[in-house]
Image (cartoon, rainbow, N blue to C red):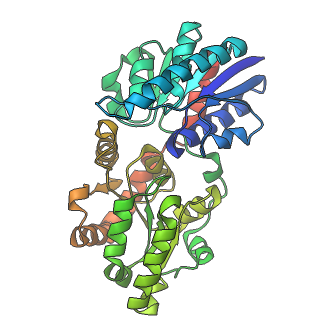
């Protein structure tokens, strides 16, 4: 029986693709034992709930810049490396697959020490520190964006795209049916506002600052992030009292969307307004939805900006950088996108960018080793 060790985590953007690849491996080859090592946080717990043998290690984040936080995280990293060396000695897998994120690098370095083959996948256009370090000894590197080729030797690099959750891919809903299920009007455009698994405080603030003028024209389904939910509910309640009840009924918010909820939200949406994490881009692409991307300026290596402009090259999205996140700019972009000449073209471009077989392409690379 083949033994494959999975590592990665720290955010939904790391964990969801990792679970998709795990599912694809098991569908491709039944003679496989999967094991997971990673931080035990709210994302890593998803693996601890599954029928997969799991081991936790301390999570640490190494930064490419000076930060007082490194004084804490460097010792934590050394402890996690010792933990990984110890655990892998007893597991001794045939291959290690990493999706990156806090906790992955010590596992990869331990695999290198034991000369275990490594496959890595980079979700973003600009590689993370974990990917840059592990690429030096990885047998196979899978990437999501063409721009990432420039960082590596091409001989062992494959453009696979970014795996999306299997639960989003089957049994799609018609847009009108999904809108009805969510309690929205069928004939008024619906904007799905996403901030990633943690939410986006600044996108949330933009929506609340412009609550009435946006709702005069459109409906909004707003994922604010679990940690922002209570504050957002209070703001919504206050703003709803100040405007017509007809307009306030066009707005709904959620903290965190489950797989079934996000699938229904994507199906219902006419347009997505979001940050430009790789996971959101590839999910939006799969559903063929035009989008407006607002890159997070503080993202490591400015990768969200590179992601956004890479995706927008084929006409699937418009990019508004945060300094330009103004009401008139956004409303002008939305009107341009909803024009008959643009909407269908952007939708087709989004679908053309999608790579629904990404998880199986990566699984094949893992099993080939």
**Residue at the (60%, 78%) spot, across then down:** 180
User: Is residue 41 left or right of 144 when viewed as pictured?
Assistant: right
Residue in the foreground of this view, choosing between 39 and 215: 39
Q: Quadrant of residue 271?
A: bottom left
Residue in the foreground of this view, choosing between 289 and 255: 255
**Count of numbered tags:** 0
Position of residue 257 measured from the top left corner of the image (x, y, whole percent) = 57, 60
Position of residue 164 measured from the top left corner of the image (x, y, whole percent) = 55, 44
Position of residue 160 measured from the top left corner of the image (x, y, whole percent) = 48, 32
Q: Quadrant of residue 27?
A: top right
Q: Is residue 221 visible?
A: no
User: Is residue 73 left or right of 57 when viewed as pictured?
Assistant: left
User: Is residue 338 left or right of 27 when viewed as pictured?
Assistant: left
Judge whether 336 appears above or below 36 on screen: below
Q: Is residue 215 visible?
A: yes
- Which corner quadrant holds the C terminus? top right
**Residue at the (49%, 33%) spot, across then down:** 101
Judge whether 125 appears above or below 202 on screen: above
Judge whether 65 appears above or below 306 on screen: above
- Which corner quadrant holds the N terminus? top right
Q: Quadrant of residue 332?
A: bottom left
**Residue at the (47%, 47%) spot, across then down:** 282
Residue in the foreground of this view, choosing between 90 and 35: 90
Position of residue 255 measured from the top left corner of the image (x, y, whole percent) = 53, 64
């Amino acid at each position: 029986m083949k033994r494959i060790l999975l590592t990665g985590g720290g955010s939904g953007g790391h964990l969801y693709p990792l679970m998709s690849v795990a599912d694809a491996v098991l569908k491709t080859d039944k003679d496989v034992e999967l094991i997971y090592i990673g931080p035990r946080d709210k994302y890593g717990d998803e693996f601890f709930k599954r029928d997969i043998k799991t081991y936790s290690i301390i999570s640490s984040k190494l930064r490419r810049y000076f930060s007082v936080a490194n004084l804490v995280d460097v010792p934590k990293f050394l402890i996690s490396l010792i933990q990984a060396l110890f655990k892998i000695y007893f597991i001794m897998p045939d291959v290690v697959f990493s999706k990156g994120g806090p906790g992955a690098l010590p596992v990869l370095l331990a695999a290198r020490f034991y000369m275990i083959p490594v496959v890595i996948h980079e979700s973003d256009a600009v590689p993370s520190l974990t990917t840059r370090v592990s690429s030096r000894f990885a047998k196979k590197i899978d990437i999501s964006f063409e721009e990432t080729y420039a960082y590596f030797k091409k001989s062992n690099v494959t453009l696979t795209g970014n795996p999306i959750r299997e639960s989003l891919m089957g049994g799609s809903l018609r847009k009108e049916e999904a809108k009805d299920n969510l309690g929205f009007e069928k004939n008024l455009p619906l904007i799905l506002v996403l901030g990633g698994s943690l939410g986006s405080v600044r996108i949330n603030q933009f929506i609340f600052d412009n609550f009435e003028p946006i709702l005069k024209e459109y409906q909004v389904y707003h994922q604010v992030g679990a940690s922002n939910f209570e504050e957002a509910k209070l703001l919504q309640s206050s703003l709803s009292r100040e405007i017509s009840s007809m307009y306030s009924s066009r707005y709904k918010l959620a903290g965190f969307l489950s797989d079934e909820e996000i699938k229904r939200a994507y199906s219902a949406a006419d347009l997505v307004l979001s940050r430009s994490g790789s996971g959101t881009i590839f999910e939006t692409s799969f559903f063929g939805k035009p989008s407006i991307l607002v890159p997070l300026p503080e993202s490591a290596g400015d990768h969200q900006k590179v992601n956004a402009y890479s995706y927008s090259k084929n006409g699937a999205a418009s990019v508004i950088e945060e300094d330009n996140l103004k009401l008139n700019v956004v409303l002008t972009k939305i009107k341009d996108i909803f024009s008959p000449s643009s909407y269908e073209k952007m939708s087709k471009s989004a679908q053309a960018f999608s790579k629904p077989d990404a998880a199986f392409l990566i699984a094949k690379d893992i099993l080939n080793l």
